[in-house]
Amino acid sequence: MSGYYTLRPRPWRRPSKKAVSETLLFALSGAAIWLANCGPAWALWAGPFGLAGQYFWVRDTWRNREWGKFALSWVFALAWYRSLCKLLGWPDPVRLVWPLIFG
């Protein structure tokens, strides 16, 4: 019987930080996009999920030195922040800052 594969339980290993990061990035970003397309009642909740997922996008693109994706992830973070402001009833940050920049 030597040489046959035996079904022994493998010892549990802690998942790597990268695996956890990518799993959360996938789950939060996927939930945000899904909620954004579920209709007006659910779309308001896309902002908090999207903004939570942007932390992982910004961190991972910074660590991997992907500067184009890094800049784009900040644009997406601003977009998700705008939807969070809409959910909380706060004024739109772009409408507050736009006149200061472009007069």
Image (cartoon, rainbow, N blue to C red):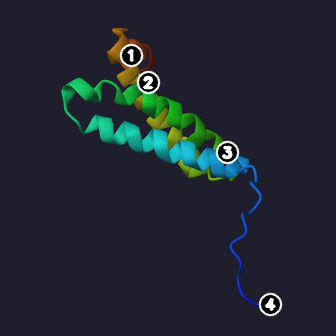
| Kind of residue indicated by mark 4 | Ser
Element under disc 3 = helix
Residue 2: mark: 4
Element under disc 2 = helix
Element under disc 1 = helix
Mark with earlier residue (2, 4):
4
Mark with earlier residue (1, 4):
4
Evaluate whether residue 55 shows in this view. yes
Q: CA distance from mark 1 to mark 4?
A: 65 Å
Query: Would you identify the image quadrant in which residue 42 lies?
Result: top left
Residue located 59% across and 40% down the image: 56
Pointer 3 residue: 62
Element under disc 4 = loop
Residue 81: mark: 2
Looking at this view, is 13 or 28 the one in front? 13
Residue 85: mark: 1
Looking at this view, is 102 or 58 the one in front? 58
Task: Looking at this view, name the residue that lies furthest to the left.
Answer: 39
Around disc 1, counting alpha carbons within 10 Å, would you say few (fewer than 14), some (14 to 19), or many (20 or more)? some
Residue located 43% across and 15% down the image: 97
